[in-house]
């Protein structure tokens, strides 16, 4: 499989990356890193009648997906940080999965695509280092009428449901038992 990473066909390189993502371990991550800069694209349609606009998939996007699965926590953050500057929004969205909080915050300030903004905000929320900025970004996204708005509203509702109540209800043990009777 290692030889396929340097194959002339971008589809074969992507196939090798997907194999490493499924069967590799953290020790294999280093062989994936060089392909994050791979300029190749391949036809990734499942069927011939799939829409043509989605047929060109960047190898570098598949490399980022593989690296997310193979790396240990915090590893290769610089690689992901650099990929946040890619021209392809799909690559930027994948780069958000492993980028540092500082790089995510910088990208969030200039990102024009709402779906990438959503991905960045969720990663910041998960990382729990920039919770306030993540929630503010999700609140801004909720104001739209697209998929990012629906997703942002869903995440914000879930976050609100997970927040501890500010006051505890005053129910005694005896009151609780009498409700069951």
Image (cartoon, rainbow, N blue to C red):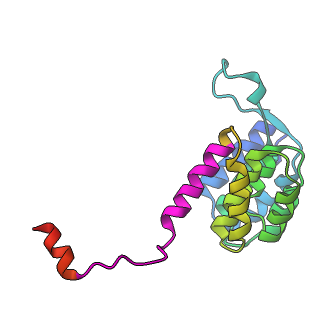
- The prevailing secondary structure element of the residues shown in magenta is helix
Image x and y of residue 70, in percent: 66, 62
Q: In the image shown, does 34 or 163 lie closer to the viewer?
A: 163
Q: Residue at x 62, y 44 (%)?
A: 150
Q: Residue at x 77, y 44 (%)?
A: 13
- Which residue occupies the extreme top position in the image? 49
Q: Residue at x 59, y 57 (%)?
A: 156
Q: In the image shown, does 90 or 172 lie closer to the viewer?
A: 172
Image x and y of residue 129, in percent: 70, 74
Q: In the image shown, does 170 or 114 lie closer to the viewer?
A: 170
Left or right: where 11 falls relative to 20: right
Tell me if residue 21 comes above or below residue 55 in the rendering: below
Tell me if residue 130 comes above or below residue 88 in the rendering: below
Image x and y of residue 174, in percent: 17, 80
Which of the 4 quarters of the picture holds residue 179? bottom left
Start-end of magenta stretch = 148-172
């Amino acid at each position: 499989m290692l030889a396929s990473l340097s194959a002339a066909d971008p589809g074969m390189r992507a196939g090798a990356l997907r194999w490493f993502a499924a069967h590799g371990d953290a020790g294999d991550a280093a062989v994936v890193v060089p392909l994050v800069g791979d300029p190749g694209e391949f036809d990734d349609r499942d069927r011939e009648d799939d829409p043509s606009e989605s047929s060109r998939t960047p190898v570098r996007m598949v490399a980022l997906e593989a690296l997310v699965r193979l790396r240990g926590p915090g590893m290769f953050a610089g690689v992901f940080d650099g990929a946040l500057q890619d021209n392809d929004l799909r690559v930027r969205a994948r780069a958000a999965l492993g980028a540092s909080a500082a790089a995510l915050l910088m990208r969030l300030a200039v990102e024009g695509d709402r779906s990438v903004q959503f991905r960045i905000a969720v990663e910041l929320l998960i990382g729990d280092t920039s919770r306030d900025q993540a929630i503010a970004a999700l609140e801004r996204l909720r104001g739209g009428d697209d998929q990012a708005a629906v997703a942002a509203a869903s995440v914000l509702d879930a976050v609100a449901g997970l927040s501890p109540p500010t006051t505890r209800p005053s129910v005694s043990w005896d009151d609780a038992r009498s409700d069951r009777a």
